[in-house]
Image (cartoon, rainbow, N blue to C red):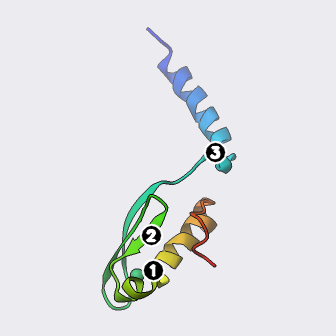
Amino acid sequence: MPDITGAVAAKRSKAARYASEQDRFRLHSIRATMQSEHDERHIGFEDGSWSCTCTFFADHKTCSHVMALALILKEQAGLQLRDELE
Ligand SMILES: [Zn+2]
């Protein structure tokens, strides 16, 4: 019988190293909901493009909701999706 405990421990160790090498990761797809001051918003990121169900996004292709999620991903997870913060 294989040593599952040892195998999982080895994977945890490798995961810790990968987690410190965030350049290895590219995020391709996100789906999220958030409660704005006005309504529940549905935010997405797919194939390099953001989407949001708010009317501001429909007119400007960006909004406070996708900007906020991009900030969370960058500041809390170290992940950046293109240059939406500009
Ligand atoms: Zn929005």
Q: Are marks 3 and 1 in contact (CB under 8 Å)?
A: no
Compute the Cα span from label 2 to label 1. Answer: 8 Å
Rendered view: 31 above or below 19: below
Q: Is mark 1 within 8 Å of ligand 1?
A: no
* Residue that appears at 52% across and 27% down: 8
Residue 41, position as x, y percentages in the image? 34, 78
Amino acid under label 2?
Trp
Compute the Cα span from label 3 to label 1. Answer: 28 Å
* Residue that appears at 63% across and 79% down: 86
Q: Residue 74 lies in what quarter of the image?
A: bottom right
Q: Which mark is residue 50?
A: 2
Q: Are marks 2 and 1 in contact (CB under 8 Å)?
A: yes
Q: Residue 82 lies in what quarter of the image?
A: bottom right
Q: Earlier in the sequence, mark 3 or mark 2?
A: 3
Amino acid under label 1?
Lys
What residue is shown with label 1?
Answer: 61
Q: Earlier in the sequence, mark 2 or mark 1?
A: 2
Residue 40, position as x, y percentages in the image? 31, 80
Which type of secondary structure does the marked residue at label 3 adopt?
helix
Q: Earlier in the sequence, mark 3 or mark 1?
A: 3
* Residue that appears at 55% across and 65% down: 73
Q: Which mark is residue 24?
A: 3
Badge nearest the viewer, 3 or 2: 2
Badge nearest the viewer, 3 or 1: 1
Which type of secondary structure does the marked residue at label 1 adopt?
loop
